[in-house]
Amino acid sequence: MLRAAVFVLCALPPLAHAVTWTKAGSTKDSRVFIDKASVRKGDGKNGEGGRRAWTLESFAKPQTAPDGKQYLSVKALHLYDCNERSVTLQTQSFYPEPMAKGEAVGTYKFEAFDAEQVEPGTRYAVAMNAVCGKGTVARAAAAKTAP
C-alpha cells in the first residue's frame, strides 16, 4: 500500500506541469492556441488591464527564426494590455514540429520590447480576444473610427 502511494506521488509532478492548449482561433497561415491556466493579471499601462499568457502558434509551412533555423511552431509569453489593446512580447521558443514538439531550436527573452497595437484579423487579435474577452480588438478598432 505504501509503495503504491509513493508511486502515485512520484507520478504527480509531471502531470502537474502538463499544458492543455485550447484553440483560440486561426489566421490564414497558422492556428493559435492559448494555455488558459497561464493567464495571470499583470502590469498593464493603466494598471488593471494587464494580463500575461502563454500562446502557441502552429504553422502549416516552415518559418524562419531570427537565427535562420526553420520551425513549425512557436510558444510565446506575452503581456496583453486589455485597456490599450496592445501586446508586448516577453519570451518565445521555436520548435521544429507542430504543437511545440521536439527540442526547441531557439529561445529568446526580451527585457525591453516595445508594445505593439493589436489590429483586427492578426494572430495577436486572436490571442488577445481569448485573453481579454471576445470583441476586445473589434471594440478598439471601432473606437478609433468613431467621430
Image (cartoon, helix red, strand yellow):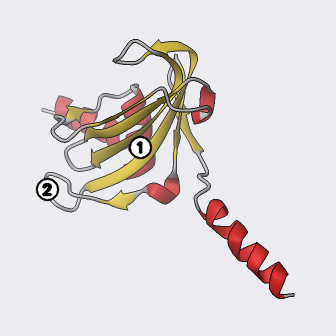
Task: Give the mark nearer the N terminus: 2 vs 1.
Answer: 2
- Secondary structure of the residue carrying numbered label 1: helix
What residue is rendered at 16% in x and 60% in y? 47
Quadrant where the C terminus is found in the figure = top left
Q: Residue at x 33, y 43 (%)?
A: 78
Q: Is residue 133 visible?
A: no
Q: Residue at x 30, y 28 (%)?
A: 119
Quarter of the figure with residue 122:
top left
- In the rendered view, would you say 22 is above or below 2? above
Q: Dot 2 surroundings within 10 Å: few (below 14), some, or many (20 or more)?
A: few
Q: Position of residue 114 (x, y in %)?
A: 16, 34
Looking at the rendered structure, the kind of residue marked 2 is Asn
| Residue placed furthest toward the right | 1
Helix, strand or loop at label 2? It is loop
Residue 116, position as x, y percentages in the image: 22, 32
Residue at image mark 1: 129
Report x, y in % for residue 76.
41, 38
Instruction: Identify which amino acid the numbered label 1 is placed on.
Output: Asn
Mark 1 surroundings within 10 Å by alpha-carbon count, few (fewer than 14), some (14 through 19), many (20 or more): some
Q: Is residue 70 above or below residue 94?
A: above
Q: What is the residue that sits farthest to the bottom in this orientation?
A: 1
Question: Where residue 46 is drawn, which disc sits there?
Answer: 2
Label 2 with label 1: CB-CB less than 8 Å: no
Any mark on residue 57, and which? none
Task: Confirm whether residue 52 shows in the render.
Answer: yes
x then y, percent, for residue 18: 62, 55
In the rendered image, which quarter is residue 50 located in? bottom left
Q: Quadrant of the N terminus?
A: bottom right
Q: Nearer the viewer, residue 54 or 132?
A: 54
As measured in the structure, the alpha-carbon distance from the residue carrying label 2 to the one carrying label 1 is 18 Å
Task: Please tell me how many numbered marks the rendered image carries.
Answer: 2
**Figure check: 45 above or below 68:** below
